[in-house]
Image (cartoon, helix red, strand yellow):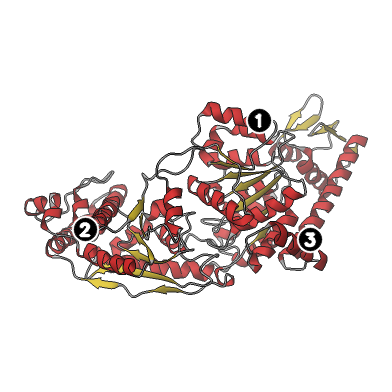
Amino acid sequence: MIIDVDGNRVVIKEYGLQLKSYHIHQLDFWGFVSDSITKSCTSLSEHNILLPKLLQYFDKEKIPYKLTELCQKAVDNIIKERNEFGSHIEKAMDYKNGNINSDVLNEFISFLKEFVPRKLKGHQIKAALHLGYIKNGANFSVPGSGKTTVVLTVFEKLKLKGEVNSLFIVGPPSCFGPWQNEFKETLGRGPDCYIFAGDFRINREIEYFRTENFHELYLTTFHTLLNDVDNVIEFLSNRNLKAFFVIDEAHYIKQINGNWASAVIKCAEHAMYRCVLTGTPIPKSYEDLFNLIEVLWPRKNLLTSEEKFRLKKLEAQRADKEAKQILDKKIGPIFYRVRKKDLGLKKQNFIPPIQIDMNKHEKAIYDSIFNKLRNSSKNDYLVNIDLIQRLIKGRMIRLRQATSYVKLLSTSIQDYDEEILSNKDSYANIIQNYDQFELPAKLEYIIDIVSKFQKDKKKIVVWSNFIGTIKLIEDHLNRLGIYNKKIIGETPIQKENIVEGETREKIRNEFVDSKSGLNVLIANPAACAESISLHKTCFDAIYYDLSYNCAQYLQSLDRIHRVGGSELHEANYYFLQYKNSIDSDILDNLKRKAKKMYDIIEDDYSIYSLDMFDDENEVEAYKRLFHPKNLDE
């Protein structure tokens, strides 16, 4: 039996009677196409991964074979590449552990002094040294640790060495502004930037076919990358473009075989170097790491199919120690991680909730809704599971609306149409014309608190989960002459290269400017909790209302508690809470989930979900409120 290579394929010739039927089945499983007439097999996958596995299998089965001269050279090259890669990975682990040659360290410090105006923290220097060496690496540091600064520093170093000439960033639209701002603050110059996302297709295609004078910074979204995947591959393959390909908020591509992930993986291998950034590398499962590894080291088979299967099995068995051993050995060297405790930030002060009595009408309406739901819940067992899930979600939103702004009860909720007032006719007019009857008691407190901050010339961010409530707060602050702006879902994100009017980025920049006069920002966590930093001049946040979404809550906390400001200033968090309402349950739930998150976040390979990133929290809360006896069943 002769084994040969034909291009990237493995060819098994003249196998005759040497291969039994179960051998043929194994080859079929590996993607070989057999020809029973010529007694030959040809692989469909590339030989650099398959050939060593094939030879190991034949040796184990004691099947004699001969290698052609060309195949022997391929084997020798594979062994050489694996040994070189192994040495590279081993040295990367030394960098990660701080075992760095003093000459290398001194040279890097000199580079920072001469070319990087921003003063890096100690942990950022270590992370930059690691990424600068491995070049295809990940940074899994906690949110607010300064991952963007690390990447920009490494980019500048590699650019000066002539190894790269452009940064190509893929991420959510909310990251565009921060990349442009951080570029200027880190490197001391505004970037020559082109934003693919949001531009007309014809303009994007013109840019994709550019062959020289490339922009220094390219920004695009996962969605645009998916739409333009062939053009992006062609662009990155240009021999004059040496792109440093960066995936920001990389947890967006965790889904195996997902469209976004597939597009990113296809494009990544055509870049000069690659980097992935996320503070939550394993939001649901060990499988979430697989795509990230494939982006960084395509075709290197860093985790074999057998190891991936083993990790899935260990996860199902909750055998975390064994899984950690595999991950430490195989992917530990390629990522750097800084924990919250390593950042050297001042403490976060969570002020005891401000207990507020509801005003007359909002209390009556809240009590009516709660009593109606308590009675309705007695028949929940009669309703099918899908319907009860929709009902629970709608009911919990109604309760939260009632503790935020009663008029919100007149708005519709998708997939939910249930009468939740015990005395509809008597309350309908009050809900519809609520503003004519009274102000929410919370609004009165917000106005008082914001006014005090205005007198002290201190900035504050006000969080609410309801757009109607945000507009109500905005309107009343405007009436009092308090300059404020809001960021909600309808506030435009800077996607285009030329933007007129207010965008989230412009509002954020004005707010953090200490001399702008804009000291009040009203924001929705869904629109403003990710990627937007407020910590340089704002150290106080007040929560008008909350949701059960712990992920957004944690992200909102980090907006004013991050590297680059929080080393000198404590962050203060205030919470408005109606007495005898759902407010206390929401905050208690968030605190409990947050504690679990912080308890495990110090571990490199913890699975982060803990039911924090799905709608199960509302179901649990509903059971606590209306089915307390069933919680232990």
Label 1 residue SS: loop
- Quadrant where the C terminus sits is bottom left
Left or right relative to 555: residue 582: left
Q: Is residue 632 visible?
A: no
Q: Is residue 428 above or below residue 215?
A: below
Label 3 residue SS: helix
* Dot 1 and dot 3 residues touching (CB under 8 Å): no
Work out how far the residue at label 1 is from the one at label 3, CA to CA, in angstroms.
Answer: 37 Å
Disc on the earlier residue, 1 or 3: 3
* Dot 2 and dot 3 residues touching (CB under 8 Å): no
Q: Nearer the viewer, mark 1 or mark 2?
A: 1
Q: Amino acid at mark 2?
A: Ala
Label 2 residue SS: helix
Residue at x 71% of width, y 51% of height: 302
Disc on the earlier residue, 2 or 3: 3
Work out how far the residue at label 2 is from the one at label 3, CA to CA, in angstroms.
Answer: 59 Å
Left or right relative to 618: residue 401: left
Write down the residue under mark 1.
Answer: 210
Work out how far the residue at label 1 is from the one at label 2, CA to CA, in angstroms.
Answer: 55 Å
- Quadrant where the N terminus sits is top right
Left or right relative to 36: residue 199: left
Count residues near mark 3 (Cα–Cα under 10 Å), then give few for <14, some for 14-19, many for 20+.
some
Write down the residue under mark 2.
Answer: 402
Q: Amino acid at mark 1?
A: Arg
Q: Is residue 346 above or below residue 627?
A: below
Residue 91: numbered disc: 3
